[in-house]
Image (cartoon, grey):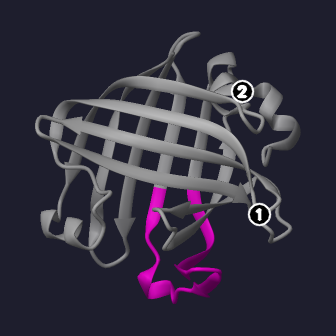
């Protein structure tokens, strides 16, 4: 795990959410409030949520081995009446030598890659993930580093509410366009 020894400080519900060996999985479910300032941008990034309140959300996380590396797979479903918005992420260790960092690759096949820094709160009740480092356009096996102008800024905070419940908040922004989309809500580890 990218967090190393700080992983043990995490609240038990967050550890259950992330401590998955290859072949293991966990499901979390709940509702989210989703917003999106640029509805037209969904044509470019269809994984962006559709604005709504109390949107049912289903997330399946599992550990797996991909290209010889132990990875963490997320499949998120925002379940709207009449449609489902699915996003897929594969998280692998970042290879830049700095601690507590991962590379998230989005979509199937992956076409976007973001380097994230991970930070556990002093009390262990929250995990904060922020973009920090290179971002990539992915073509098959080829990773092309994006110029800074194209970088987005993502902040995701997961906070333990109790032994089975996590509060999640995600905000994605851009230096020129400002806050673009996000979601927040409460999810239960099933």
- Please identify the residue farthest to the top as the structure is shown: 163
Can you give x and y, in whole percent of width and height, for residue 97 in the image? 86, 68
Q: Residue at x 26, y 50 (%)?
A: 49
Query: Could you tell whether 95 is left or right of 42 in the image?
Result: right
Q: Nearer the viewer, residue 138 or 104?
A: 138
Q: Answer with the quarter of the image where residue 117 lies.
A: bottom right
Q: Residue at x 67, y 49 (%)?
A: 118
Q: Answer with the quarter of the image where residue 55 lies.
A: top left
Which secondary structure dominates the residues rendered in magenta? strand
Count of number-bearing discs? 2
Q: Is residue 174 magenta?
A: no
Can you give x and y, in whole percent of width and height, for residue 106 in the image? 49, 62
Can you give x and y, in whole percent of width and height, for residue 183 in the image? 32, 42
Q: Residue at x 70, y 26 (%)?
A: 15
Q: Residue at x 27, y 62 (%)?
A: 46
Q: Is residue 148 magenta?
A: yes
Quadrant assignment for the N terminus: top right
Q: Which residue is mark 2?
A: 10
Q: Nearer the viewer, residue 110 or 136?
A: 110
Of mark 1 and mark 2, the one earlier in the sequence is 2
Q: Which residue is mark 1?
A: 67
Q: Which residues are magenta?
A: 130-154
| Element assignment for label 2 | loop
- Above or below, comparing residue 73 to residue 173 in the picture: above
- Above or below, comparing residue 26 to residue 181 in the picture: above
């Amino acid at each position: 795990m990218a967090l190393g020894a700080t992983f043990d400080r995490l609240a038990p519900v967050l550890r259950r959410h992330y401590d998955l060996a290859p072949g293991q999985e966990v499901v979390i479910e709940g509702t989210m409030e989703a917003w999106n300032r640029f509805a037209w941008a969904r044509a470019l990034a269809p994984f962006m949520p559709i604005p709504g309140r109390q949107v049912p959300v289903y997330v399946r996380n599992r550990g797996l081995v991909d290209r010889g590396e132990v990875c963490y797979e997320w499949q998120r479903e925002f379940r709207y009446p009449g449609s489902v918005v699915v996003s897929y992420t594969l998280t692998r260790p970042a290879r830049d030598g700095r601690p507590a960092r991962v590379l998230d690759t989005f979509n199937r096949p992956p076409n976007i890659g973001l380097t994230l820094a991970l930070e556990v709160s002093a009390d262990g009740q929250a995990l904060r993930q922020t973009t920090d480092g290179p971002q990539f356009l992915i073509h098959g096996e080829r990773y092309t580093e994006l110029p800074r102008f194209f970088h987005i800024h993502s902040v995701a905070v997961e906070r333990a509410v109790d032994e089975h419940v996590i509060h999640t908040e995600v905000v994605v922004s851009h230096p020129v366009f400002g806050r673009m989309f996000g979601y927040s809500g409460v999810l239960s580890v099933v």
